[in-house]
Image (cartoon, helix red, strand yellow):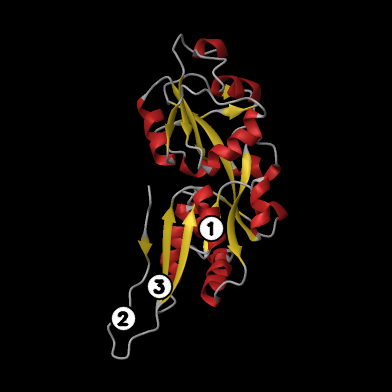
Amino acid sequence: MAALVLALTLTGCSGGVERREVVVTGSTTLLPITEVSGEMYAEHNEGVSILVSGMGSSAGIESVSTGSSDIGTSSRELKDAEFELGLEDTPVAYDAIAVIVHPDNPVSELSTMEVRAIFSGVITNWQEVGGPDLPIGLVNRDEASGTREAFSKIIMDDAQFDRGAVVLPGTGQVRSVIADIKGAVGYISLGFVTDDVKAVSIDGVEASEESVVAGTYPVQRVLHFFTKGEVSDVAADYIEYVLSPDVQDTIVREAGFIPITAKDGSGE
């Protein structure tokens, strides 16, 4: 699933305009930020193209580490081995991972331990957590997903995911399956939760901006831009643009994420 945005093409004037490109590769979770901000940045910077593709956090980290991309986007932290790649981390937003079920599922709250037991295959029927006598249909993300990596680290601890789960490559696919199947359960970024699905509370705390800023929602993370070595002037300027109020207070919020300045109060 690669989404490619060519934000601006060369003008047709005589003499032309020098074309400058910034290649941004990685997390599908970050696409609502990178696609829209890339388009807006290019509109105000003649001759600039922001090329955005969503292939997963691991792909983004690998791409920027090998020089194939200017910016690698990730919805997870670096793994131990990746710290040796010499990447520079720029946090750009906060996010929560919501556990989602079908809207008709009466289960509205789960504990961390119950979520772990469900996704490890120990709990297999909704009746075991106060719901109807209905088999649980597990929907998981692929191993390249930063959302899966973060969910595994925060929720699963040392438990392994049930190998019988349906594995999907993108957030949109997970949401669509949950919306169609009453017994299904999955997890997606809070910014992608719509009325088609229902986010359950975890340990009695609802997934919301307020609970993330307060630090009470247990499944939250930072969204990252990674770069390596000296970046081009246009790439550096684009990163500064993403961190500006023009993006943080509009695009980031409209995508359902939380501005990186929110926790220290400077974005209020």
Residue sitting at x 63%, y 25%: 159
Kindly tell me whether residue 126 is visible in this rendering.
yes
Q: Nearer the viewer, residue 103 or 58?
A: 58
Q: Residues within 10 Å of mark 2 (few under 14, many from 20)?
A: few
Measure the C-alpha gap from mark 3 to mark 1: 22 Å
Marked residue nearer the N-terminal end (2 or 3)? 2
The three-letter amino acid code for the residue at tag 1 is Gly
Residue 119 in which image quadrant? top right
Q: From the image, state whether disc 3 or disc 1 is nearer to you.
A: 1
Marked residue nearer the N-terminal end (3 or 1)? 3
Q: Nearer the viewer, residue 197 or 97?
A: 97
The three-letter amino acid code for the residue at tag 2 is Thr
Q: Secondary structure at mark 1?
A: strand
Residue 14 in which image quadrant? bottom left
Task: Give the position of the C terminus as an image quadrant.
Answer: bottom right
Residue 129 at x, y percent in the picture:
56, 14
Position of residue 140 in the picture relative to residue 224 (left or right):
left
| Residue behind mark 2 | 11
Residue 122 at x, y percent in the picture:
57, 15
Asked if 98 appears above or below 28 in the picture, the reply is: above
Give the tally of numbered discs.
3
Residue sitting at x 60%, y 64%: 228
Residue 72 circle label? 1
Residue 258 at x, y percent in the picture:
58, 50
| Residue behind mark 3 | 43
Asked if 261 appears above or below 182 in the picture, the reply is: below
Q: Residues within 10 Å of mark 1 (few under 14, many from 20)?
A: many
Q: From the image, state whether disc 2 or disc 3 is nearer to you.
A: 2
Q: Residues within 10 Å of mark 3 (few under 14, many from 20)?
A: some
Marked residue nearer the N-terminal end (1 or 2)? 2
